[in-house]
Structures are given as structure tokens and as C-alpha cells.
Image: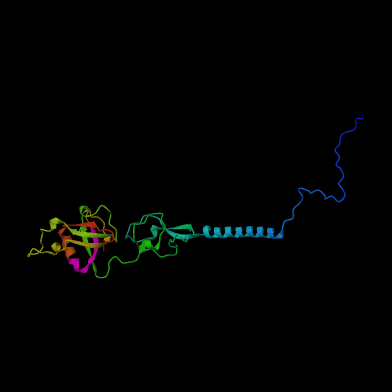
Amino acid sequence: MDTPTGPLTATRPPLATGAPAPYRIGGARRRRPAVLALAVALIAAGGLGGAALYTATGKRVAVIALARNVPAGQAITSADLTEAHIPLDPALKPLSVNSRVVGLRATADLKAGTLLTSGDLTNAPLVQSGQQVVGVATKHTQLPAVKLQPGTRIVLVATPSAAGNSSSGNGSSSANALSALTATVVDIGTPDTDGTVVVDLAVPSAQGAAVADLAASGKFALLLAAQGSG
């Protein structure tokens, strides 16, 4: 038996006549033009959407913010204000830096760092038609612990000890006739050396004399009016 002495090699049998050519793996695929165009369009749309989103959310506007606390009723001064820049947001409606707010009064206690809105301010006068301003000299024991501010609604109450005091011969005085009256604080004076503070109150003109008489007696107290009281 003859043994082959040369190197062993694998031989592929010849293809039969008419047999199909073998399939080639890894050949380059043809990409359809429509698919490429759609991909380009999607990329472009995504870029435009991102740019629009950045423009809408990244744009910053100059608005008015509070530089310090402003109590309710106090008039706004330029020192109370500062400029802030925030992204444009439809949910926020702060006043722009071009708004005229100096001289308007705060409708509530405003905190430093907050943005100023139109609802925070009012130009309504403290003294309404048909009212008078009466100055009432008060001691600290006749005032609430909360510091009064212009615009604060208070109730002027005759204390029980005032009921027995009469300023007229018939035993009926205007102070006795006035037991309680709702008024508006217009201004607060500087305390005297003995601690007396004059509080200007806007009261109905028909009650002005009674308030002045009660203030002169010193038998009264100022209470904070309940919220929503007229």
C-alpha cells in the first residue's frame, strides 16, 4: 500500500456546471435613499427642537425683586428694590424693571429676595372719601405687640374704666357713646421720651369728634382687626 509522502492539503471538489456561486458575507449593503433622507430629516428636526427649547427656557429677563423686607401698608422706596434676571417662564408674572412701583404701598408683608408682582402693591389712598384723620397718643400698653404699619386695620376700643368717666354734665359723653370703631392706620409717629407714640387713624367723619374725645381721655386700646373686616 502506497503512503503519501507530501503535505496533506484539502481540495474542494469542482463546482458542477451551472451551480450557483457561493453567497459572500460581509459585502457592502446598499442603503436606500429614502431611509437616509428620513434620518437626516429627523436629526435636523431634533436640532431645531432643541434650539427652540433652549431659546424658550434659556432666555432671561430683567424683573424687580425686593432688596429688603417691606411690611404691609408701607410705601415702596427705591432702596427697597433690586434687579433680578430670571429665565422667561409663563407661569411667573413678576414686574419688569421698567414698571413704576416707587410710592405704591405693599398689600402684605413682602420678604427680601422675592419677586415683585402687581398683586403685591396698591395705589389706593389710605384716607377714603368721608373720612377724617385723628391723632391718637398711645402708650405701649394700649398697642398690640405686632408693630403697626400704614394700612393696618385696627379696632379702637373704649376700655371698661372709661365707662364711668363723663366729660359732660348730663353724664353722656361722646367717649361713652363710642365703644368700638374700626379704623385704618395712616401713619405712626416717633416715640417720645416717655414712650408715647401718636398713631394717626382714618375714621368716619361722623365719628371724628368721638374718637378725639376718647383719645383725650386715654381710656382706650388699639386692637388688630380680624382679617376681612370692613
Q: Residue furthest top?
A: 1
Q: Is residue 16 magenta?
A: no
Residue 190 position by quadrant: bottom left
In the picture, the quarter occupied by the C terminus is: bottom left
In the picture, the quarter occupied by the N terminus is: top right
Q: Residue furthest front?
A: 1
Residue 73: x and y in percent read 32, 60
Relative horizontal placement of residue 189, taking residue 15 as reference (left or right): left
Identify the residue shown where x is 21% and y is 68%.
205
- Picture mark count: 0
Identify the residue shown where x is 20% and y is 52%.
141
Residue 183: x and y in percent read 24, 62
Q: Is residue 215 above or below residue 16?
A: below
Q: Main secondary structure of the magenta part?
A: strand
Residue 6 position by quadrant: top right
Residue 19: x and y in percent read 84, 50
Q: Nearer the viewer, residue 183 or 1?
A: 1
Relative horizontal placement of residue 212, taking residue 113 as reference (left or right): left
Identify the residue shown where x is 61% and y is 60%.
45
Residue 164: x and y in percent read 10, 58
Q: Give the magenta-colored segment's residue range.
A: 197-209
Q: How is the image coloured?
A: rainbow
Q: Is residue 204 magenta?
A: yes
